[in-house]
Amino acid sequence: MVGREAEFTTMRRGLSAASQGACTCRVVSGGHGVGKTRLLQETIDHATAQGFVTVRAVAYPTDANVPYSIVADALSPLVRRMDPGGVRTLSLNPKGTAHINADPWAEVWLEGAKLGDTPLAGIQVPLGTREFVFKHPQYGEKRVTITIRANAPTTIAHDFTKDKD
Ligand SMILES: Nc1ncnc2c1ncn2[C@@H]1O[C@H](COP(=O)(O)OP(=O)(O)O)[C@@H](O)[C@H]1O
Ligand SMILES: [Mg+2]
């Protein structure tokens, strides 16, 4: 792809925001042959390589009276890949994987709920920038702000013994 650095960067920024749980929308417009489809295909390839599930839908004038035709167009390739009788859930509260540890150990809290005592390996936590609270009866409390992303596990560690505050 030639001469589309700025546009492709904008698309990648949208994916990066999505990996943190944000919803983003991009409108690509222009005359015939300027490269709209190519830019979208490059974005799909980039997203797929990062582990995103991508879907595509086309709005046809002839489908104007067909209820949910765009949704059906987008989802039918995913449905076709499922086993007959299988059930899958589309997540409305997307989660990512985190490994959480503390020295010597800690109770870990997120948004007012206790996640558990460290070590917490491979737990599922909501995507986005979150404040984790580490609590220890002697060392007290430490707040750590971390961004949980969809495409790779996040490791969060806090060492109370080296804490100077
Ligand atoms: N940035 C680019 N670098 C190289 N080739 C491109 C670029 N953008 C488009 N093309 C090529 O130009 C042709 C028309 O692009 P296309 O994306 O189909 O245009 P549109 O969807 O806007 O009508 C395609 O063969 C495509 O691969
Ligand atoms: Mg096109």
Image (cartoon, rainbow, N blue to C red):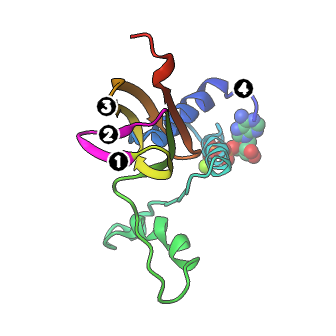
Q: Could you tell me if the residues under marks 2 and 3 are in contact, i.e. CB atoms within 8 Å? A: no
Kindly report which numbered mark, 4 or 1, lies closer to the viewer in this rendering.
1
Give the mark nearest the N terminus, 4 or 3: 4
- Sequence-first tag of 1 and 3: 1
Mark 4 near ligand 1 (CB under 8 Å)? yes
Residue 11 against residue 67 in the figure, above or below: above
The CA span between labels 1 and 3 is 16 Å
Q: Nearer the viewer, mark 1 or mark 3?
A: 3
Q: Secondary structure at mark 4?
A: loop
Vertical relation: 1 (above or below) 57: above
Q: Circle 2 is placed at which residue position?
A: 109
Residue 7 seen from this side: yes
**SS category of the residue bearing label 1:** strand
The disc at residue 115 is 1
* Mark 4: few/some/many CA within 10 Å (<14, 14-19, 20+): few
Q: Position of residue 48 (x, y in %)?
A: 64, 52
Residue at 62 percent across and 43 percent down: it is 43
The residue carrying mark 4 is 3
The residue under label 3 is 137
Part of the protein shown in magenta: 104-116
Residue 118 placement: quadrant: top left
Q: Amino acid at mark 3?
A: Pro
Chief secondary structure of the magenta span? strand
Residue at the farthest right position: 2
